[in-house]
Image (spheres, rainbow, N blue to C red):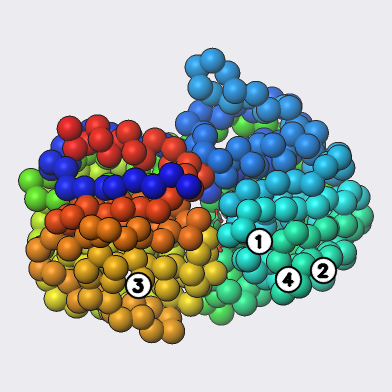
Amino acid sequence: MTSHRFSALGPLTGAISVPGDKSISHRSLMFAGLAVGRSTIAGLLEGEDVLATAAAMRAFGAQIARNEDGTWTVDGVGVGSLLEPKTALDMGNSGTSTRLLMGLVASHAITATFVGDASLSGRPMKRVIDPLAMMGAGIEASAGGTLPLMLRGASPAVPITYRLPVASAQVKSAVLLAGLNTPGITRVIEPVPTRDHTERMLTGFGAKLEVGVENGETVIAIHGEADLKPMDVTVPGDPSSAAFFMVAASIVPGSDLTIRNVGLNPTRAGLLAVLRQMGADIEEVNPREVGGEPVADLRVRHAQLTGVDVDPAIAPSMIDEFPVLFVAAALAKGTTRTSGLDELRVKESDRLATMAAALTSVGARVEEHEDGLTIHGTGGEPLRGSANGRVKTMLDHRIAMSMAVAGLVSRDGVMVDDTAPINTSFPTFMPLLEEAAR
Ligand code: S3P
C-alpha cells in the first residue's frame, strides 16, 4: 500500500492531455488480436487493466509489441483460431478484460481459467455466465458466480437473442464477441443505451453488424463466423480520466485548465451535462473526430457549483464518473440527490458505500440510500480533510482519484490509504495533477 496526502495546491492552469480511453484500448487490442494481419494502435492506454488484456491476447496467440514511438503493433490470430492459454489468465483488477474475454473464449474450442485480485474476485460474473452458457459454453465459477472461474468454449456455439437484464456494456460486448465465432446471427437487445465502442469498432474491423430500434429498444445483430481485417486505430483521450480534472478545475478557485483530446461519445458524456447543469464553466474547443469518435479540447474554469437532482436516466452515460461527481456535490451550494445507482455497488468497490464513508470522514455531509447518495454541499467552503485518519479506497482507482480531488479543496488535506490502484487506469494522474497545479 502506498499512501499519499493530497493537499490544497494552487489553481489548475495550462493544458494537459489525459491518456487513451480504457474501454477503447481494451477493444482495440482484442479486435486487432482477432484480425488476420497487422494492425497498429496509437494512443493506447498503458495502464495495468489494458496490459492484462494484452497479456491475455498474447496467450491466445496474437503477437503484440510496443514500438519505440509509443504505438503498438498487433498481428492477429484470426476469429476461430485462438490458442488455448497454457496458464491461468490473470485479469488483475479489470472487469472489462474478464467479461469481454470470457465472451471471446465462449465460442472457441478452448478452455481458459480466469483469476483476479481481491476486488475483481468479489464481482458478479453471473451476468456474463448466463448468456454464455445459453450459447453452449461450460463454466465452473467460484461460489456466488465469481472468479476464479474456468470456461470451456463451445464449438460451434449457438446463436441467441439476449435481452440485457442490466444496463451493461460489458455484458453486451461479451455476447457480441461470442457471436463473432458463432454460426448465424447473435442478437443483443438493449433497453437502456450503454457505451457503443464495441459496435463502432467491430464495424471498423470489418464485422457485419446491424444496429436497429424495435419497440423503443436498441437491437444489435452480429453475423457470425466473421473475418476481421486489420486496422490502424487512434485511441481518443478517456473522458472518465478527464472527469477528475473537469471537477478539480471547477472546484479549485482561480482555475483555468484546458484538457486536450477528450472523447465525447454521447454514451460517455453524461458528466459534462450534469456539471453544466450545476453551473460549471466548460467550453468545448476544436470539436473533431478521432478514431471514429467525437473528440474536443475542454476548457474548464472555476465556477461555484449548485446542487441538482441527477436524472437516473443519465446514469449509464456517466457510470464511472459518479465518485468524482459526489466530490463536486460536496463542494456545491445546496443539495445534490442521486438515485437509480444500484450498479455502483458492484464496481471495483461498492462505490456508494465507499464514497459515503470517504466523504463523511473528510467532513462532507452525506446520506447513503439503497440506490444513491444525497449530498449537502459546503457552498465552496473547503472540506475539513483528514488530519490523522486515512481514507479507505478499497482497491478502487476511481475512489483514490476522487478523494485526491477532494483533498485539493480541504483544510487539512486528504490522506488516501493506497494510490497504487490508480495505475490500473490512469498511471500519469499524479504527475499531471502536479503539472496542472504548478
Ligand atoms: C465498460 C463498461 C462499464 C464501465 C467499465 C467499462 C466497458 O461497466 O463501468 O469501466 O468498457 O464496457 P458495466 O458494463 O459493468 O456497466
Does the image show residue 355?
A: yes
Q: Earlier in the sequence, mark 3 or mark 1?
A: 1
Indicate the amino acid at tag 4: Gly
**Residue contact at pointers 4 and 1, CB within 8 angstroms:** no
**Residue contact at pointers 3 and 2, CB within 8 angstroms:** no
x and y, in percent, of residue 435 in the image: 24, 32
Q: Where is residue 201, by image quadrant? A: top right
Q: Where is residue 280, by image quadrant? A: bottom left
Point out the residue furthest to the top here.
Answer: 68
Q: Secondary structure at mark 3?
A: helix
Q: Quadrant of ligand 1?
A: bottom right
* Residue 436 higher or lower than 392, as above or below: above
Q: Which residue is mark 3?
A: 356
328 on left or right of 56:
left
Crowd rating for badge 2 (residues with CA inside 10 Å; few <14, some 14–19, many 20+): some
x and y, in percent, of residue 195 in the image: 50, 58
Q: Earlier in the sequence, mark 2 or mark 4?
A: 2
Q: Which residue is mark 2?
A: 133
Number of marks:
4
Crowd rating for badge 4 (residues with CA inside 10 Å; few <14, some 14–19, many 20+): some
Label 3, label 1: how many angstroms apart (C-alpha)? 23 Å
367 on left or right of 43:
left
Label 3, label 2: how many angstroms apart (C-alpha)? 37 Å
Q: Which residue is mark 4?
A: 145
From the viewer's perspective, is the residue at label 1 or at label 2 nearer? 1
